[in-house]
Amino acid sequence: MPGCLPPPRPTEHLHKWLDPDHNVPQDAEYRTFHSKTIGHDVSYVVSLPPAYSAAPHKRYAVVYFLSGSGYSPAQSARCGVPVVHSLMEKQLIPEFILVFPNGLNDLMYIDTYDKQFPNETVIVNELIPYIDSTLRTIPDRSARSVGGYSMGGYGAAHLGFGHPDLFGSISILDAALYLFEELRPGPGEGGFGSNFPVHAFGMNAACYNANSPLVLLEKNADKIRGRTFIQVANGSRDKLRPGGERLHAQLDRLHIEHDFALREGMAHGQSGTIDPLTRPDLLEQYLFYKKAFAGVH
């Protein structure tokens, strides 16, 4: 579900709990829920599987897909939902509920350094229980997956490794897994084109390292090993490839089984522009869910 690179979002659209982009595709809905943590409503986008209405007693696994920096949940849905539904209709992957949480544009799916935007708390403590209480989910970690692309790949690793009792599978695509000393905020030469190191972490090393997926993986390795499906993928020309390779090496060192792939010739942001049915290596990132949910009923 990466790709479909968006135009830059207007500054006034940043860090909005009710995302201004309501333009969702067919088979998806823009919805809201009330957060007690922040005291007002929060938006998300949801896509129900094709047979959801026709099978009123069936329950489904859920994939929480986290958007990259600059993507709205609706933008990610416009890119991802048609592909996912096509693969479901071809019976190449199982049917599941697809949820796109609000990533607040560039806040990394953490509780920010100043606690002004407690996005991790809202997702983990409120959105997930809300989805389980209002939709026909299978409310078990084995049927709950978190995945993401770029910033969302960081978020998927952060939430997945940080909450191993919540998620039975984790998909980490072209993830922004920088070390603190590699951070170069801003659009200048060598910069990220994003100020997430400032907005989310305040350029604070202690905050950054405490939230690091690599630190959380080390801490929770025993709770992850042998009970979590993990895929890590990068383009071979992706600027974020070193972080993916670093995570791959750490998973190997910790003896945690996972899938690792380099998409030959691809730079950051390219994979979503190519039909996965024409690239077997891209199709694999969707077939991951067939494996992850194989024992889920």
Image (cartoon, helix red, strand yellow):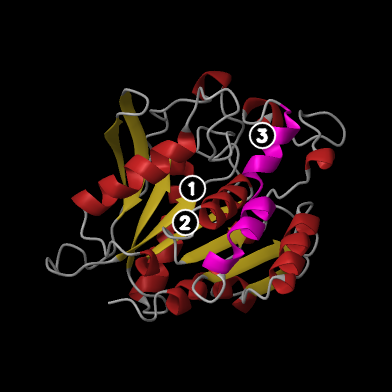
Examine the structure image and report whether residue 208 is included in the region drawn in magenta.
yes
Look at mark 3 in the image and give the residue it sits on: 207
Please, what is the three-letter code of the amino acid marked with disc 1?
Ser
Q: Nearer the viewer, residue 292 or 269?
A: 292
In the rendered image, the vertical position of residue 162 relative to residue 142, given as above or below? above
Residue 30, position as x, y percentages in the image: 32, 40
Please, what is the three-letter code of the amino acid marked with disc 3?
Cys
> Viewer-nearest of labels 2 and 3?
3
Circles 1 and 2: CB atoms closer than 8 Å? yes
Tell me which residue sits at (53%, 46%) in the image.
Answer: 67
Q: Is residue 269 visible?
A: no
Which of the image's four quarters has the C terminus? Answer: bottom left
Residue 43, position as x, y percentages in the image: 35, 35
In the rendered image, the vertical position of residue 32 relative to residue 296, given as above or below? above
Cα gap from disc 2 to disc 3, whole angstroms: 32 Å
Q: Nearer the viewer, residue 22 or 253?
A: 253
Tell me which residue sits at (54%, 67%) in the image.
Answer: 224
Q: Main secondary structure of the magenta part?
A: helix
Tell me which residue sits at (78%, 66%) in the image.
Answer: 265
Instruction: Provide the secondary structure element on which disc 3 rests.
Output: helix
Q: Nearer the viewer, residue 40 or 14?
A: 40
Please, what is the three-letter code of the amino acid marked with disc 2?
Gly
In the rendered image, the vertical position of residue 110 relative to residue 15, given as above or below? below
| Residue 160 circle label | none
